[in-house]
Amino acid sequence: DGGITQSPKYLFRKEGQNVTLSCEQNLNHDAMYWYRQDPGQGLRLIYYSQIVNDFQKGDIAEGYSVSREKKESFPLTVTSAQKNPTAFYLCASSIDAGPQRTEAFFGQGTRLTVV
Amino acid sequence: AQKITQTQPGMFVQEKEAVTLDCTYDTSDPSYGLFWYKQPSSGEMIFLIYQGSYDQQNATEGRYSLNFQKARKSANLVISASQLGDSAMYFCAMREAYGNNRLAFGKGNQVVVIP
């Protein structure tokens, strides 16, 4: 079945460590996104990518890094520079078609906790 | 700057009643798309409905309809005949034509349906 797979579902990180969240899609979508969600809050955009080997910072990119070496993959690294990384992370993808009806499809999310 | 505004506090609605969720947005782009998503407690994001800026009619999808008032930059979601399964967070989102495919979300509205 086509869809977006995020792994792992739960992730624990020690302070000072970098961790990488995986996001893979087999929908042949050009655009991919990473969002952060804190309890009771909306989705804040971390990074997004419209095409392979290209990505743009979102609203809260500090302390995060991404790569887009393959169309189907958009991993997110949470670096030690991110001071408060405990949150729910959602990955999404969509057809690159601007404002037309091209809804984003989401993965199941990764819940990251700093211990 | 915040482009999507959802300011209602948590809402309780009686089963079988209708509920309206407010969303206002800010853009100078004449071409944009508006999306509503549902997020139940499981965390998944479920696409509900889409409205394009050039659409002449309000969008409808089953029990969901969108009250689109372009001049007021308002795109309120109406859920008719509420069901217990409608209890969730609801997010409004926007993608602009000249926004490099950036998809921005509001902070969400919490809805609890009571029997």
Image: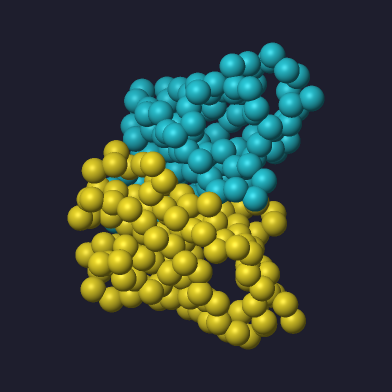
**Does residue A2 sit above or below A68 in this rendering?**
below
Q: What letter labels the chain drawn in cyan?
A: A
Residue B57 appears in the picture as rendered: yes
Q: Quadrant of the C terminus of chain B?
A: bottom right
Who is closer to the viewer here, A4 or A32?
A32
> Is B31 on the left-hand or right-hand side of A74?
left
- In percent of width and height, residue A24 lies at 53, 35
From the image, which quarter does the N terminus of chain B lie in?
top left
Q: Residue at x 72, y 77 (%)?
A: B114
Q: Nearer the viewer, residue A10 or A38?
A: A38
Q: Position of residue B17 (x, y in %)?
A: 60, 85
Residue at the image position 44 percent from the left and 34 percent from the top: A59
* Residue drawn where x is 55% and y is 48% of the image: A42
Relative to A15, is B61 above or below?
A: below
Q: Position of residue A36 (x, y in %)?
A: 57, 38
x, y percentage for residue B73?
Answer: 32, 63
* Residue at x 73% of width, y 31% of height: A113
Horizontally, is A77 left or right of B55 in the view?
A: right
In this picture, residue A113 sits left or right of residue B39: right
Residue placed most toward the observer, B26 or B89: B26
**Chain B rendering hue:** yellow
